[in-house]
Image (tube, rainbow, N blue to C red):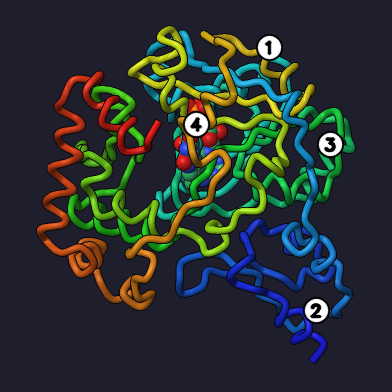
Amino acid sequence: MIKNNVQNKVDRSSCTGCGLCVSVCHQKAIKLVEHDDGFLYPNISINCDNCGVCLNSCPIDHLLHSPLDSDSLSAYSYRLSDRDELRKSASGGAATAMMLYELSRKGIIYTCSYDSDFKSSRIIKINEKSQLQTVKGSKYCESMPPNYVLIKNELKLGAEILFIGLPCQIAALKKYTGETDNLITVGLICTGKGSRILLRKNTEFLVKKFNSRILSFNERFKKKNWLVPWMNVTFENGKKCSRILGNTPYGMLCHKLIRRSCFDCKYKISNAPEDILIGDAWGAEVYSKKAFDSMGCSLIIGINEKGKKYVSNIKGIMEEISLDEALKCNHAIDSNTIKDKFYNVDIQMLHTNSLEEIVIKNIGVRGMLLNNIRNTLKYILPVPIVKTILRKKHSF
Ligand SMILES: Cc1cc2nc3c(=O)[nH]c(=O)nc-3n(C[C@H](O)[C@H](O)[C@H](O)COP(=O)(O)OP(=O)(O)OC[C@H]3O[C@@H](n4cnc5c(N)ncnc54)[C@H](O)[C@@H]3O)c2cc1C
């Protein structure tokens, strides 16, 4: 009965899966459990004594308010000078640069890594340069959040911490730790996190097809340039698999089958919980010729003074740009993703069908072929033409 009071409060349409309720539960009565849609939701056990701490700390039921002072925002285009590291980064390597700076001052980093079987991912702690390669790159499916209590304890002991994650995770962290000088938070501009089932099914499919364990998996590999991401996989038996991400069933679905709460994100830039927001500097060539690099270019937005001061310490090629221009070229900064037909995919299909079958059932073989031709042309055509097409598509 008591348990049900709390259990009934879990609203799957608004829960972000941030996991703060799990961390704060003194009874250890809450676990994040993957549901049939492939997302993590709190599951409350009979040990729950209905104390209500979880409900009161929820960053959705009790929003963290971070009113934005638009006059204090600064925007920069950024890229690493090291071409090899730039190529290995998701966009311009802004996150890498911040991690390098944090390590140079003996700080600790919390950010996202795949698990060793590449079927899931989680927020992990790193404190050595040799660990950087395991966390670089974008992971588009939902990851297991951290234990916020452990982070708060480390902060109390005086550790300098850099947390790079999704704005909903940062809202949870800040809700629990409050503002503290030794914590710097970097949020990723986000269109929504994909279902964990997609990553798992994709990995299982690849392992079976190539008959080998996966050694590395990059879902945003820059084969020729940054504009058309590739899925690049290396296997223990020496084989490799490389395909335009958007031409794989996984790539077609991971930006579509996103968490329900992501369609109404409460932590877009107007209520940004982070000190710094980073993402892709789409349209950089429009606002500054110097800013654009076909091998990747990050957009960095300093949300507050602390964030801006931190950004001033990173090494690389950086240029201050107009925030208005940046907003015009990257809708995900302040707008939510709109549901499309894929969103209505019958959840049961995720369990009974292959990813390819799901795509074919929803857009047909012709739709899939047209999609593949479009992406292949984007890859083959010269960069200026591709940029013009993308600008038309996203209307900027
Ligand atoms: C689900 C998702 C959706 C995104 N959507 C957009 C978008 O619509 N528009 C846009 O401009 N940018 C978007 N991004 C951000 C963009 O893809 C890059 O991740 C970002 O620009 C960082 O690039 P970088 O070169 O600085 O990163 P790198 O230097 O390669 O480092 C990447 C950093 O991001 C962290 N990270 C990667 N995946 C996750 C994850 N799932 N959860 C928490 N941390 C993670 C890594 O651990 C690492 O710290 C999205 C990212 C994700 C994960």
Q: Residue at x 68, y 24 (%)?
A: 302
Give the number of the mark in front: 3 or 4. 4
Query: Residue under circle 2?
Result: 48
Specify the quadrant of the image occupied by residue 106.
top right
Q: Mark 1 CB in 8 Å range of ligand 1?
A: no
Q: Mark 4 CB in 8 Å range of ligand 1?
A: no
Query: Residue under circle 4?
Result: 328
Other-residue count near label 1 (Cα within 10 Å), few / some / many at <14 / 14–19 / ≥20:
few
Q: Residue at x 54, y 31 (%)?
A: 327
Q: Is residue 92 left or right of residue 104?
A: left
Other-residue count near label 2 (Cα within 10 Å), few / some / many at <14 / 14–19 / ≥20:
many
Residue 219 percent location from the top left of the image: 35, 40
Q: Amino acid at mark 2?
A: Cys
Q: Secondary structure at mark 4?
A: helix
Q: Residue at x 66, y 48 (%)?
A: 267
Give the number of the mark in front: 2 or 1. 1
Q: Are marks 3 and 1 in contact (CB under 8 Å)?
A: no
Q: Secondary structure at mark 1?
A: loop
Q: Secondary structure at mark 3?
A: helix
Q: Earlier in the sequence, mark 2 or mark 3?
A: 2
Q: Are marks 1 and 4 in contact (CB under 8 Å)?
A: no
Q: Work out how far the residue at label 3 is from the one at label 1, CA to CA, in angstroms.
A: 21 Å
Residue 113 seen in this snapshot: no
Q: Earlier in the sequence, mark 2 or mark 1?
A: 2
Specify the quadrant of the image occupied by residue 45.
bottom right
Q: Amino acid at mark 3?
A: Leu
Query: Residue under circle 3?
Result: 155
Q: Earlier in the sequence, mark 3 or mark 1?
A: 3
